[in-house]
């Protein structure tokens, strides 16, 4: 299986970028992984929120192939503790999914069509985080999930 994290817009903060690089370098020891950063929508100020979400949807859909699974990181998604997230991820791996995409939406969320295409939604917390922080938090949790699956001493209950 190959996993992807898709995000809109580049990371501005150096400390976040350093953390992202750190966790990606750890994740690739467990699975094929790639982070795809899509460009911010051009002329954002002249577009409605719905037009922005449509443009972002088109960029995301262009990455997907038939049979790919899409899980949206969404505040209305299922919340997991770290062990339960690990179990969910292991089930996805064991079902033979070839490519699994986790997607962080833009500032106004996802389009209705993207929700329809998705196989699931995951919420990292009831709290609100910046989209840049979500990248780092999710990558750390993905790494943690793999260490749990392998019985490695990173996670402590």
Image (tube, helix red, strand yellow):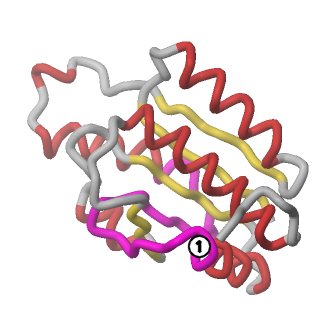
Crowdedness near tag 1: few (<14), some (14–19) or many (≥20) residues, C-alpha within 10 Å: many
* Residue at the (64%, 29%) spot, across then down: 19
SS for callout 1: helix
For the N terminus, the quadrant is bottom right
- Horizontally, residue 16 falls left or right of residue 150, namely left
Q: Is residue 7 above or below residue 31?
A: above
Q: Residue furthest front?
A: 157
Magenta span covers which residues?
61-84
Can the viewer see residue 67?
no
* Residue at the (52%, 65%) spot, across then down: 70
* Residue at the (41%, 72%) spot, across then down: 79
Q: Position of residue 135 (x, y in %)?
A: 51, 40
Which residue is more in the foreground, 76 or 116?
76
Kindly identify which residue carries mark 1. Answer: 85
Image quadrant in which you'd find residue 42: top left
Q: Position of residue 90 (x, y in %)?
A: 73, 78
* Residue at the (17%, 40%) spot, across then down: 51
Q: Position of residue 37 (x, y in %)?
A: 54, 32
Can the viewer see residue 22?
yes
Q: Tell whether position 110 is magenta.
A: no
For the C terminus, the quadrant is bottom right
């Amino acid at each position: 299986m190959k996993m992807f994290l898709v995000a809109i817009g580049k990371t501005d903060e150096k400390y976040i970028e350093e953390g992202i690089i750190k966790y990606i370098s750890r994740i690739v020891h467990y699975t094929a992984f790639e982070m795809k950063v899509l460009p911010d929508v051009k002329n954002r100020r002249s577009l409605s929120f719905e037009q922005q979400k449509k443009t972002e949807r088109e960029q995301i859909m262009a990455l997907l192939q038939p049979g790919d699974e899409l899980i949206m990181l969404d505040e209305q998604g299922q919340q997991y503790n770290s062990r339960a997230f690990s179990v969910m991820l292991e089930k996805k791996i064991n079902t033979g999914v070839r490519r699994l995409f986790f997607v962080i939406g833009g500032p106004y969320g996802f389009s209705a069509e993207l929700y329809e295409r998705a196989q699931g939604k995951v919420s990292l917390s009831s709290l609100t985080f910046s989209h840049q922080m979500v990248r780092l938090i999710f990558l750390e949790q993905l790494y943690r999930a793999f260490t749990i699956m392998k019985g490695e001493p990173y996670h402590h209950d």
